[in-house]
Amino acid sequence: MTADDYSAMNGSSSAKAKMELSKTLKIQLSNPAQLDKIDKLRELGVAKFVALPQLVVVGDQSSGKSSVLEAVMELPLPRDSGLCTRFATNITFRRSPQTSITVSIIPGPTRSPEKVEELKAFKKTGLTTLDGQTFLSILKDVCQVMGVTGPGESPSATKSTFSADVFKIELSGPDRENLSIIDIPGIFRTATEGVTTQDDIDLVKTMVGDWIQDERTIILAVVSANVDIATQEILTMAEKADPKGLRTLGVLTKPDLVDDGAEHQVIDLVMGKRNKLKLGYCIVRNRSQKELDTDSDSRTRKERSFFGTDPWSSLPKDRVGVDALKSRLQDLLSEIVQREFPKIKRQIERRLILCKKNLYAMGADRESSDQQRHYLEGIAAQFERITNDALSANYCRHDIFGQDHNLRLPTLVVDRSDRFAEDIRSKGHSVAFKGDTSAEAVTTTNKIEAKSALPSANNGSDDADESHVSNGSDGDAESGYKLGLDKLGLDSKSSKYPELLDILQQDLYISLTKGCDILAWIETEYRKARGYGLEVMDPNILPMLWQEQSSNWKGITLSFVNDIIVYVHDFICRLLNHVCPESKVRNGLISFIMDDLLDKYSAAIKHVEFILRVERHGTLLTKNHYFGNTLSKMRNERLVKAMKQHEFRTNRQDAEGACHFVTVVPVSGMTSALSQGNLEHAVDDIHTVLNAYYKVVMKRFIDTVVAQGADYYLLTSDESPLKILTPLFISSMTPEQLDEIAGEDLVTKRERQELKEEILALEQGKKLLRG
């Protein structure tokens, strides 16, 4: 087929009719409204967060890429102007009744808010034509605003060589097809001294890689037909981004420069016989140096004439020439937009929800003291509300109580209080009282070897407590055992809070309940303490015996308070972690209130130690009538037990003559039961008084420690550590304190600003897509 035949075929009325029909179908299929919305989404900056369908032109600087763009745009672009070598260019075609040309700048993703506004403000409208000089003038202005070296300018240290901003050219008119192309700076391999550097080479390659990596991007890989395609780096980069070749369209240029005899290699590419791509190849002819000043119509005639000659005339017409390329690009863009448009809408909505959630989690802006105070007061109010519900055991009010049972503080305290009461009852006494069956059971369980000595009361001093406290050596292992902080893993909990180690009572021990006769022990102590006088109960002996008998109270009680402190501290830290997700603010709050917390923990310990001193070393005193009743009951029981040793059964006749067996105690037996030696009587009486007093005071002590040491000091009073963090407490903070705790660091500020920008862009995009 000759060039004339090729021209005649394209000029026939039948061919024209087919072309018009094809254009009409494409207009119907392309959905200009969707294409327009995709472009507007890109202008809004949505492409920074959600990938948008796009055609991206990439290639070497010498591949003829600029000539292809010039032919597609049908505009005489200025030569040697640096077009598409400094920044990406978005060329958009739109069908409209009026002819117009608009140029603008889409800011890059790393621009500051101030620079974004400056770049968005750059816009030139009202143009109907764009000659070379006008375009060159616009390019200079664009480069100036972007801060890059402009056409004809020498490199400057104050200006960049390349920019991540996008230069947008929008061409509208009745003859325009709906199409949008993004041209990326061409890659190059050799730096030019004083113009480009190795960093610039790497930067452009990175820019190309970033633009072509997304699956919604159609890659237009422009390569010269007159070079070995295996050496084309741009195809290697395209293959890396698109391994299956599903979205790469090859564009071959400069076919007129192919060596004679090598044309079949290029034809094989276009026909898909080698280096196969799913989208295939198109081929166009560039202007030669002599043709640079010719218009687009002349360029089109030359191209048609060239491809009408052998062997190029054998190629499919939909793969040859600029018109075929434009049609192919329009089809590809329409197809991907139609396929991805619903997905983009859903992705924008999902990402918008996620961004708003992340911004909400960061709390309100915290630039000023008022904002910081308001933010912290909100945290404190939520902390106070959940704490009050926890103390009321109103666990159904918040899901957090179901998610973390360690926040059920009253339940933990009640359980531990029950164990504390049981420990005092079963392990609190040093020697088992006579006739105490529960104590005797514990004594049997914990009985030590028979060689163990009787406990010794050391004049009522604090040393009495230490007489059975192990120093941790092996030799003490059989005389005592160490109380851990809790049987339910509180040792590990306390290790999480090293700040408590200085106030928690360490190395608490209690002595084992002695497996010895308490009367023998009392007699031994009585003999060591008696002086001149009658063999009656010395009032000084009872306090010494009392202090020894209650010596285990200290270890058991302080271990109990340790546990409650750990429970409370763990509650505070866990709840703060829930109401204040931001670690910097949370750590700042904990650090700020830590001294107050430790003071209140110490106050609770000191108060419990005070209770211990009062009950163990103070005056033996009670107004509880139960003591008198118990004492009388025990004495009667002791007498009855003694008399039972002399009782016997006998037959007795009543008034009616009937005989009955009765139990009697002879007068001599009663006299014997009442007749004790002075020492024996004193020992028995001391035991009775000590036993009765122990029972009364033990109950009083348990209630007092739980009610005052645990409940009042650590839980419910206004001075409780749980009541420190309140809105009122926050209101008393100075501006300096507020800023130190709630002030945002640079990373947080930047994260907040980025989230706001993304939310704004996504909301505008969502509104656009709904319109």
Image (cartoon, rainbow, N blue to C red):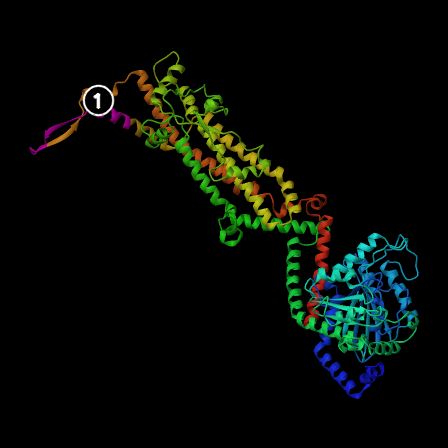
In which quadrant of the rendered image does the N terminus lie? bottom right
- Please provide percent x and percent y for residue 429: 40, 28
Q: As rendered, which of 179 and 284 lies closer to the eye? A: 284
Label 1 sits on a secondary structure element that is: helix
- In the image, residue 432 sits, relative to residue 719, either above or below, namely above
Q: As rendered, which of 439 and 712 lies closer to the eye? A: 439
| Furthest residue in direction bottom, as rendered | 13
Q: Which residue was labeled with disc 1?
A: 670
Q: Which residues are magenta?
A: 636-659
Tell me which corner region of the image, top left, top right, bottom left or bottom right, holds residue 353. bottom right
At horizontal 65% and vertical 41% (from top left) the residue drawn is 592
- Please provide percent x and percent y for residue 698: 41, 32
Residue 472 vs residue 33: left or right? left
In which quadrant of the rendered image does the C terminus lie? bottom right
Magenta stretch encompasses residue 641: yes
- In the image, residue 373 sits, relative to residue 187, either above or below, namely above
At horizontal 24% and vertical 21% (from top left) the residue drawn is 673
| Furthest residue in direction top, as rendered | 532
Q: Is residue 374 visible?
A: yes
- Please provide percent x and percent y for residue 411: 47, 45
- Please provide percent x and percent y for residue 376: 65, 49
Q: Is residue 713 visible?
A: no
- In the image, residue 328 sits, relative to residue 731, either above or below, namely below
Magenta stretch encompasses residue 97: no
